[in-house]
Image (spheres, rainbow, N blue to C red):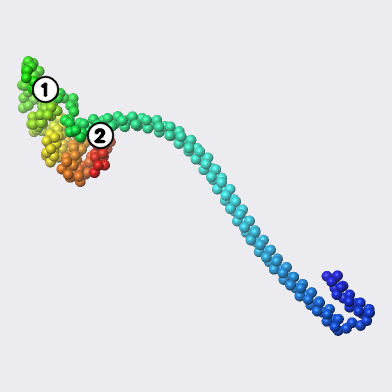
Amino acid sequence: MRKVLFFLFFPVLFSGISGCVTDQDMAAVNSRLNKLESSRSSMDNKIDSLKTSVEKLSQEIEQKEKKLRSEYANLLAENTSLKNDIYSLEGKLEQSDYRLQKFETQFKRLNNSVSALNKRIVSVEKYLDLEKSKTDFPEEDEDSGNESDQADNKTEKKPVTKESKAQDDFDPETAKPEDIYEKAKTNFDSGKLDKSARLFALILKKYPEASVADNAAFWTGEIFYKQKEFKRAIIEYQNVIEKYPEGNKVAAAYLKQGLAFYKLDREDNAKTVFETLINKFPGTNEAIIAKRKLENF
């Protein structure tokens, strides 16, 4: 600045030395001074503006830096959490592998159980006359009497034995209910439904409290079912359900009653009976068959 003033005043000094300073010279000097002052003021304003801009920029940078630090801290926390989750998942995967091995073993056992259960279901379906072939019921523990039927069809007569004579002397009016039931079931298995029906009816009339009475009622319903008298079969099955609720034929009676309703095109009634069976006797072979039938509705 001093150098500038020196050069500005140098002509004045020089002119003072050489002669008197004129008004024109002073005006020129003042004009230069004013320009310099204006230029310095403009520079100060620019400097102030730059300072303001720098301060704002510094504040923005500081805010962004804080934000970045916060986000970085969050990322570190999330990264730590993810690592913990990964470790936890690895542990769970190891447990899952162990459990999977156990499940595979259990599945093999369950598969074997299902195979055995399917065999039981097939056996029950045959027992309850559910096969498409509509074959007769399989024999139970009682004698079927098939051999005697075959003997009746032959032209040659067998010699009368004590056993055959005892069978010919069978008197249902004096026989025990168990013996009557055995004879009735033998006739049923051999297709002699009328004879079987009379003997079952005798049990229900004379011995309604006997241990075989519930079975006699059930097989009476089966006779009507085989004869396609489904309404009468439904009534007999209902007798089993109401009169012998503790007997071993209740679940079977529900199942066959539902099938009888289905034969009569009364699917709503059949559905109700099947659902009742499933609720009252879950897990039984009859309930499994009922579920299978409901799937076809």
Name the residue located 91 percent from the left edge and 77 percent from the top edge: 14
Name the residue located 33 percent from the left edge and 29 percent from the top edge: 112
The disc, 2 or 1, on the residue closer to the chain's N-terminal end is 1
> Where is residue 68 drawn, in percent x and y?
61, 54
Element at label 1: helix
Q: Nearer the viewer, mark 2 or mark 1?
A: 1
Q: Residue furthest bottom?
A: 23
Residue on which the image places disc 1:
150
Determine whether 237 is above or below 71 in the image. Answer: above
The amino acid pointed to by label 2 is Asn
> Where is residue 95 drawn, in percent x and y?
47, 35
> Where is residue 47 drawn, in percent x and y?
73, 68
Name the residue located 20 percent from the left edge and 38 percent from the top edge: 255
Name the residue located 11 percent from the left edge and 38 percent from the top edge: 229
Element at label 2: helix
> Where is residue 116 drawn, in percent x and y?
30, 29
Are there few (<14), some (14-19), or many (20+) residues within 10 Å of tag 1?
few
- Quarter of the image that includes the C terminus: top left
